[in-house]
Amino acid sequence: MTLPTLFIPHGGGPCFFMDPAGGPPDPTWRPMQAYLAGLIESLPERPRAILLVSGHWEEPQATVHTGSGQPLYFDYYGFPEHTYRLRWDAPGAPDVALRAAELLSAAGFPAGEERERGWDHGVFIPMKVAVPGAEIPLAQLSLRRDLDPEAHIAMGRALAPLRDEGVLIVGSGMSFHNLRERGPHVTDRAALWDAALTDAATDPDPARRAARVAAWEALPFARFAHPREEHLLPLMVALGAGGEGPARLDHRSAVFGWAVSGYRFG
């Protein structure tokens, strides 16, 4: 069975785990947490592994993590002490990482390898919600530092065969990522951006969909939503890997006046 691909919001810092007693998060984050908690169950079959590209890892060229298990990389700042002791002990998936590198190289994207870097919070925060038992192996893929949208869509296309090999391809970012802009004054602009992005990302024509999302800067309030686009680029990989299949809005919630969306392809 062919798995879909996903672009998911990963929240802000350790947002789902701010209560040291393990209670519910700030109500702001509950809809997003509920969405993530239901991800695996929503799939047509349980994946044997996950390939995840996070908005928090960039390299000069696409790079795969080939470690068999790694520590967490707490790349957030100013949060309660207990959030720096979180655990998510899923095994790595070096076979998936090497297969991804092979597919990328065959498509003209030289791929590097990395073994030491820990999983950043774009990985372990959403996956700790989606796979709390940490039983699904995971391989991480970096963004390219040039943040070229068409290149990332083409990378996704190259990785599409993994979907028939039991691997769930996940882009982890945020559809709106301007952390300095919060409050009611943001709402209208964020809503216009989100509506335009969603219309482009769910265009029923796959070629037009890819072209419209690649041209994201032409959408209303694009640079307001993304002063820098690293949190949007995982969407490009998921969209490219989704191929010719349908696309749909998979999640929408309101956070700090922002509309935040997730998408499913294929």
Image (tube, grey):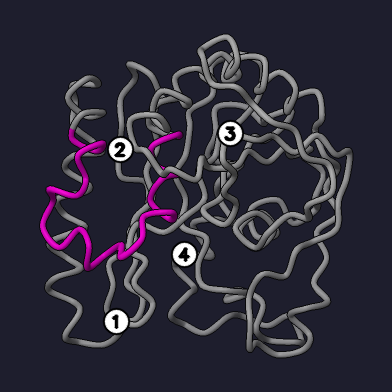
Look at the image and give the residue range highlighted in magenta. 212-237
User: In the rendered view, would you say 40 is above or below 258?
Assistant: above
Disc with the residue nearer the chain's start (4 vs 2) = 4
**Residue 157 occupies which quadrant of the picture?**
top left
User: In the rendered view, would you say 222 is above or below 63?
Assistant: below
- Measure how far apart labels 4 and 2 are at the Cα level: 17 Å
Disc with the residue nearer the chain's start (4 vs 3) = 4
For mark 2, give the secondary structure. Answer: strand
Q: Does the magenta stretch include residue 264?
A: no
Q: Nearer the viewer, residue 61 or 132?
A: 61
- Measure how far apart labels 3 and 1 are at the Cα level: 31 Å
Disc with the residue nearer the chain's start (3 vs 2) = 3
Q: Is residue 205 left or right of residue 86?
A: left
For mark 3, give the secondary structure. Answer: loop
Mark 4: amino acid: Met
Question: For residue 181, which numbered disc appears in the image?
Answer: 1
**Residue 137 occupies which quadrant of the picture?**
top right
**Residue 245 occupies which quadrant of the picture?**
top left
